[in-house]
Image (spheres, coloured by chain):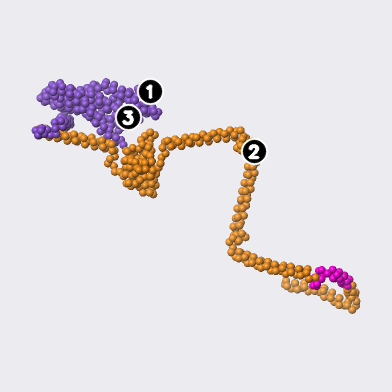
């Protein structure tokens, strides 16, 4: 027992958990150190942006459109009780711009891009490509991690705006089929209640989510081990961890934005 | 265990603690909103808070000035609501302000609305109690509204009957509207009233003129009202009149006594004259004799004038009488000069 106590500081599980946190912390700090050090790989960033956007565009279009349409459909009965179905565009726009679009984009991207980054970097790690880059005097962290994280941080807000538009189109389709509202009337009504605070909050959310997806995916892939099994584990962990962090960030950002709102 | 690994575990622990503190701090700030703004606490006691919750807003003149801190029951089934009011708004809320439970918009959250208060009264302080105005619940309002509807229905029904009667020419108003004769009478009456009012106007003008004269200085009424000497003289005159009346009374009494005495005492000279018929006939005879004697004496005197013994005397007297007017004229001329 005494040997065990000496072997671990707080116990095996706690020590492992704290070590994982430490590793993530070191990775996080290294990212910020590397981003301001040396030449930026702009071409790689652009290529990653294109890859991330292109890979997610169809999925985000479909989910965004369905989300907008279904949310409108579900909200109608509550509003029609008060005879306030004319408020549907405003309600749906607020919900989409403030919460749904950033969250849907982030969750879809976490599943699609996060896992992709995790698997890609994990396979590079287990096949020792990263080690080979180090040997060939190329900074793998700068080239692989920084570019992907920056690309995610840039691409997710863009995808979020795109998702908002598609969701609003889905909502418009539902509204116009039921209430016969015109396109101009719908969007005038929808944007009447949207403030710059809503938009900036959504942008902040999307930046935070993009950064989280990139950094978590890269961390999991970069630190993958144990062969092909490790690659799958890295991809899985990237999705689960980034989704978990996205929800925590959602709560925090909403609280902060509410502080400014009131 | 290697020192570097131990250090790494501790750093990991501190990172977790740091993240937890950050998250808790953000959540606390977000939920408590203006946690750093200093507030005062006042209370209000309601009969019914209509679903008010902790954290609901407090409005004063449409501006949010605080939140509901706590809600608890008191012994007599009343509800004590503690209100957190921002210190910067404290000076505007007066001690005699009132509180009521209201709604934010048509279907919004419940809020406390503080209103009223006068500038003469000092501002509220920590621990003060704000008086509550009882707001009738929706059910009570609807009950009153229902009663009003019934009353309104009764009133409109009565009006319906009245208007029907009026149209049929029944009742005073109906006859007034439909009977031409009544209209003519009314028209004449109005004409007469118009004339009367013109007369009244003239009368009023005359009265005004009269009253102006009364108040004019030197007038009798004005003297009566203002001159103290006249009143004194008047009082003296009245006193003397009283004395005169008393004297007249005494005199009348004396006369009465004398006349009674005359009536009763028939043997006195005047009584005999008044009551004795024989004496009266004698007296008449005597007067007749005196008349005839006088006539005869007159005749004798005329005869005497013609007598030569007295003729000279009468001529002298006539001459003197003729001279006296001439003397008076001379005297008058002398006086004029």
Q: CA distance from mark 1 to mark 2?
A: 68 Å
Camera-nearest residue between B289 and B326: B289
At 72% across and 69% down in the image, what residue appears?
B254
Secondary structure category for the residue under label 2: helix
Question: Is B326 above or below relative to A42?
Answer: below
**Colour assignment, chain B:** orange
At 27% across and 41% down in the image, what residue appears?
B36
Q: Earlier in the sequence, mark 1 or mark 3?
A: 3
Q: Which chain is purple?
A: A
Badge 2 crowding class, 10 Å Cα cut-off, few under 14, some 14 to 19, many 20 or more, is: few
Residue B50 in picture, x, y percent from top left: 37, 37
Residue B328 in picture, x, y percent from top left: 77, 73
Range drawn in magenta: B267-293
Queried whether the magenta region covers residue B330, the answer comes back as no
Judging by the rendered image, the residue that carries numbered circle 2 is B182
Residue B269 in picture, x, y percent from top left: 80, 72
Q: Which mark is residue A49?
A: none
Badge 3 crowding class, 10 Å Cα cut-off, few under 14, some 14 to 19, many 20 or more, is: many
Question: Tag count in the figure?
Answer: 3
Question: Where the N terminus of chain B falls, by quadrant?
Answer: top left
At 81% across and 69% down in the image, what residue appears?
B274
Q: CA distance from mark 3 to mark 2?
A: 74 Å
Instruction: Choose top left, top right, bottom left or bottom right for residue B133.
Output: top left
Residue B311 vs residue B334: left or right? right
């Amino acid at each position: 027992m005494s040997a065990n106590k000496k072997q671990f500081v707080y116990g095996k599980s706690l020590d492992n958990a704290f070590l994982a946190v430490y590793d993530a912390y070191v990775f996080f700090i290294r990212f910020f150190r590397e981003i301001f050090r040396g030449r930026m790989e702009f071409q790689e960033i652009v290529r990653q942006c294109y890859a991330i956007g292109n890979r997610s565009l169809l999925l985000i279009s479909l989910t965004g459109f369905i989300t907008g349409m279904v949310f409108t459909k579900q909200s109608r009965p509550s509003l029609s009780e008060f005879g306030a179905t004319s408020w549907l565009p405003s309600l749906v726009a607020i919900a989409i711009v403030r919460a749904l679009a950033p969250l849907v984009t982030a969750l879809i991207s976490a599943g699609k891009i996060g896992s992709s980054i995790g698997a890609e970097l994990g396979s590079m790690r287990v096949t020792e490509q990263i080690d080979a880059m180090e040997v060939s005097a190329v900074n793998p962290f700068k080239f692989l991690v920084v570019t992907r994280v920056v690309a995610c941080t840039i691409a997710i807000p863009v995808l979020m705006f795109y998702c908002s538009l598609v969701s609003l189109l889905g909502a418009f389709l539902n509204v116009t089929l039921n209430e016969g509202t015109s396109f101009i009337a719908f969007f005038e009504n929808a944007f009447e209640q949207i403030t710059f605070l809503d938009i900036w909050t959504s942008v902040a959310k999307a930046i935070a989510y993009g950064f989280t997806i990139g950094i978590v995916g890269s961390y999991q892939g970069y630190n993958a081990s144990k062969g092909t099994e490790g690659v799958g584990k890295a991809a899985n962990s990237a999705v689960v961890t980034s989704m978990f962090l996205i929800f925590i960030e959602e709560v925090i950002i909403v609280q902060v934005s509410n502080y400014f709102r009131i | 265990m290697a020192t570097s690994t131990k250090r790494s575990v501790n750093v990991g622990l501190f990172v977790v603690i740091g993240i937890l503190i950050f998250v808790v701090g953000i959540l606390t700030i977000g939920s408590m909103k203006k946690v750093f703004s200093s507030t005062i606490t006042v209370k209000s006691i309601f009969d019914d808070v209509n679903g008010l919750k902790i954290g609901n807003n407090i409005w004063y003149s449409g501006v949010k000035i605080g939140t509901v801190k706590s809600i608890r029951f008191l012994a007599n089934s009343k509800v004590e609501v503690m209100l957190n009011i921002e210190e910067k708004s404290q000076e505007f809320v007066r001690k005699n302000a009132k509180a009521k439970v209201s709604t934010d918009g048509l279907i919004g959250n419940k809020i406390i609305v503080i209103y009223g208060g006068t500038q003469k009264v000092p501002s509220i302080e920590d621990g003060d109690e704000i008086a509550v105005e009882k707001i009738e619940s929706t059910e009570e309002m609807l009950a009153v509204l229902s009663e009003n509807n019934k009353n309104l229905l009764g009133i409109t029904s009565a009006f319906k009957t009245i208007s029907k009667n009026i149209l049929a020419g029944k009742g005073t108003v109906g006859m007034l509207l439909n009977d031409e004769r009544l209209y003519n009478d009314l028209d004449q009456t109005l004409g007469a009233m118009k004339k009367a009012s013109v007369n009244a106007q003239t009368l009023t003008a005359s009265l005004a003129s009269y009253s102006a004269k009364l108040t004019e200085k030197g007038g009798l009424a004005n003297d009566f009202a203002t001159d103290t000497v006249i009143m004194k003289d008047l009082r003296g005159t009245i006193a003397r009149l009283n004395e005169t009346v008393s004297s007249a009374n005494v005199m009348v009494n004396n006369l009465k006594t004398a006349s009674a005495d005359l009536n009763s005492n028939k043997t006195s000279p005047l009584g005999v004259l008044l009551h004795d018929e024989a004496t009266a006939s004698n007296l008449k005879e005597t007067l007749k004799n005196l008349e005839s004697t006088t006539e005869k004496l007159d005749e004798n005197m005329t005869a005497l004038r013609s007598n030569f013994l007295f003729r000279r005397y009468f001529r002298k007297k006539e001459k003197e009488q003729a001279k006296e007017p001439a003397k008076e004229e001379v005297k008058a001329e002398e006086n004029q000069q």
